[in-house]
Image (cartoon, rainbow, N blue to C red):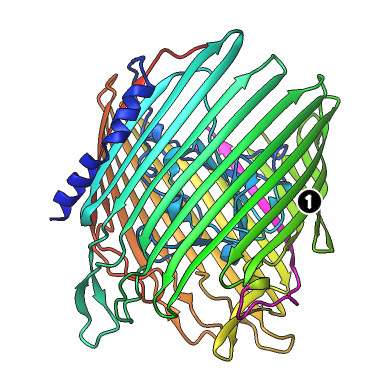
Amino acid sequence: MGLQSSITALLDNRFLVCAFFILYHSVGFAQQPSERLPEVLVLDSLRYAKGAFRVDVDSLNFRAQTRALNLSEVLSSNTNLFMKDNGPGMLSTPTYRGGDATHTNLLWNGIRINSPMLGTVDFSEIQTGHFNKATVISGTSTNLFSTGGMGAAINLNNTPSFTEEYASIQSQIGSFGNTYNHAVVNQNLMLGKVAVAVRVSANMVRNLNEFSYINNSTPSNELEISRDSKFNQESAITSISALLSRKTSITFNSWNQRSRRNVVSPVNQQIISNRNQNDTIQRMQLILNHQASDRVELKQVFFYDNNSNHYIDTIAYINNNNKYYSIQSLSSLTFDLGELHRIDVQYLFQFTEASSMNYLGFVSDIRNEGKLGVTGTVDSKRIGYSVGSRFSLWRGNFQSMPFASAIFKLSKSWSFSTAVSRTVRIPTLNEVYWNPGGNNALKPEEGNTAELGLTLRKNKTSIRTTAFFGDYENRIRWLPKGSIFSPVNISTSEVYGVELFAVQEFVFNDFNLQVKPIASYLQSLGRSTPNADQHSLTYTPDLLAQLWLVGEYKGLSCSYHFSYTDRRYITSDETAYMPDYIIQNVVINWNRKNSPLSIGLRVNNLADIPFQNMPWFAMPGRNYQFIIQYTWRANTFS
């Protein structure tokens, strides 16, 4: 019955197919890109305050680990971000290097899109098929983009191509009545003497999520079927770029999304019907780039975000509707001091107005931020550096956040990097105005972070290890205060640990093998008062380990993914924890040479292990996804 429902839902979504053929008229065939894992260790000290790593997510490339996956799934299987996940299509928020969900900034083409009410983004609602790549930057470097990213920042980029034309449609039918459909088109044209590139991407997700699970809250561990976690979503991103002249370009981006889901009940509670949630998102960007001279580059970005979150709380009998709109203006100036050094200046203005039944009306917020930095190279480009500071003015509170970094090329293959930064996170609207429980006396969270990194790049080998440390004050945690929860500043916390990323490639005639281990060890400790004992912070695993094996032979490829997640404490006194677990996934893909057709099969949770990522929220056992993709490519332009 689940498969029949999936096929019916797929056929009902015919508009994707129709839109695809209407938008794209030229057909050209080319060989699909290889099934290799993306390069994830891109060292670029001149752009970021430290070496960053990149995860390519463009669905056109049909990579083994990014097919039909949302951002939560892609990042959790390619980085050391731990995703706090309530199930497929349900709430999923990140924690990285001991940070909370509010400590990870999500950026869209460099503009922060975290909810000003919650301070977070639900990563399960972000479909990666819309984007060309995702860049993960640690908290030590996020001052280059915005405040608040004490853990990390993830920048999503979608850019139309002026050099190629393509179109692709992808469909997936999976277990439990789950389907996914995606189409993308990139078209080039001339309007008089103006070159224009248009990229349109559309997604449809239909999840019934009717999977069986063990209810560990019952004495006999009864086997039950999940029937209250449906998820439906439609989303589209349109990007139009125009080269107005040799020195000036303009880009318009539009992101529209609608999501509906049943908020899943914990397994230790009676299933409550009508726990419905509806999210509507409208985002628009206007990006202007102008090369004023050989040394001066100007960039102006205008951003509008309108977000509505409606849900029915059947426990408190509240029909709640949270809304906000936000306007941002980001002005940037880059001035080259010769060939080796440059100055970066940035100013950000943000106005937000939000409403909620729990605010007792409307609240507004104004934020001013700036950045001044210098980057460059010395000693025949063997040493790269970045130094500067971000400034923030919010509700009369002025903050300065200096940062500095350096990279040293020890040899052709080896490099050493170091970075330090001060970070600040301003309380969110909910933390201040939520009624009951809001706390208008909250102080901003403040911290200092440092990193040391060592990188080897030689032939087909890439290895990077990074040691990190963070010391924070006034961290905000929601703690029980009588019968309600209220945000309070805890005294101090500190995090330290080490991360490893490596890629090794082997070539044997027509057979290629890639091996990619990823691992992190973390200690995240905090005190509620200056004299209190130090305990591990909740929902932060000490150890994360992954291994990717990807083999290719002519048109056939197979990937194996192993991941281990250590136990996580769920109480602030370390009296209760979630057990560790191991998950294995396999993807098989076939793509005949010069054929536009690709066919894939994905098996998740290969060993069918019962596990819970978050307490009392069931996760699916072994499940299958059949994926088919058809791609047209026109001739590539020089």
**Residue 625 point in image, percent of width and height:** 25, 47
* 600 relative position to 414: left or right: left
Q: Nearer the viewer, residue 43 or 329?
A: 329
Residue sitting farthest toward the bottom = 482
- Which element type, helix, strand or loop, lies under badge 1? strand
Q: Residue at x 18, y 51 (%)?
A: 5
Q: Nearer the viewer, residue 189 or 66?
A: 189
**Residue 287 point in image, percent of width and height:** 66, 32
Q: Is residue 438 magenta?
A: yes
Q: Amino acid at mark 1?
A: Glu
Residue that label 1 marks: 369
Asked if residue 117 shows in the view, the reply is no
Task: Write down the region rendered in magenta.
Answer: 434-461
Q: Residue at x 81, y 19 (%)?
A: 294
Q: Nearer the viewer, residue 167 or 257?
A: 257
Vertical side of 611 occupied by 27: above or below: above
* 585 relative position to 142: left or right: left
